[in-house]
Amino acid sequence: MPSEILDINDIKNLVDTFYGKIRKDDLLGQIFNDRIQDRWPEHLEKMYRFWQTILLEEHTYNGSPFAPHANLPVGKEHFSKWIEIFHHTIDELFEGKKADEAKWRAGKMAEMFHFKIQYYQNNSASPIS
């Protein structure tokens, strides 16, 4: 039964469930597994802090979220699939204001990342790290 996103345990459930699906996905799994390799615990911890900062307003994340994604070999179809899996995971586990906010923020982030990656793929500019 879906519940509200209230604390770090809910964030961990969201992140773990979502990335468990990503790792098995035919389109996205190989890209993520190739990039992250054996550093999944480190990546998941970073994602816990990111979403904890965004959704719970508990400022535990520091960094630039775009930089690690700047040179990924991805296009619109990858971001569409990412959003599909994210929304499905949220709807499966959660409801309420924070769940809606998570879907909205993920959509905006995917849109921005897609446009920035597309820009770097089509121009000689390099992203600032």
Image (cartoon, rainbow, N blue to C red):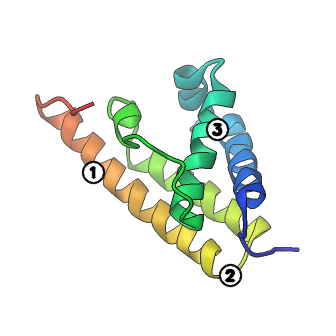
Q: Which mark is residue 115?
A: 1
Which residue occupies 60% across, 66% down? 56
Name the amino acid type tagged 2. Gly
Q: Which mark is residue 96?
A: 2
Quadrant location of the C terminus in the rendered image:
top left
| Residue contact at pointers 2 and 1, CB within 8 angstroms | no
Instruction: State which mark lies toward you, 1 or 3.
Output: 3
- Badge 1 marks a residue whose secondary structure is helix
Name the amino acid type tagged 1. Phe
Image location of residue 102, percent across then percent down: 56, 67
First in sequence: mark 1 or mark 3?
A: 3
- Badge 2 marks a residue whose secondary structure is loop
Which residue occupies 17% across, 36% down? 122
Residue 15 against residue 58 in the figure, above or below:
above
The answer to whether residue 27 shows anywhere in this view is no
Residue 119 against residue 103 in the figure, above or below:
above
The answer to whether residue 40 shows anywhere in this view is yes
Between the residue at mark 1 and the residue at mark 3, the CA separation in whole angstroms equals 26 Å
Image location of residue 19, percent across then percent down: 67, 43
Instruction: State which mark lies toward you, 2 or 1.
Output: 2
- Within-10-Å neighbours for mark 3: few <14, some 14–19, many 20+: some
Image quadrant assignment for residue 118 = top left
Name the amino acid type tagged 3. Glu
Q: Horizontal placement of 93 versus 100: left or right?
A: right
Residue carrying label 3: 45
| Residue contact at pointers 3 and 2, CB within 8 angstroms | no
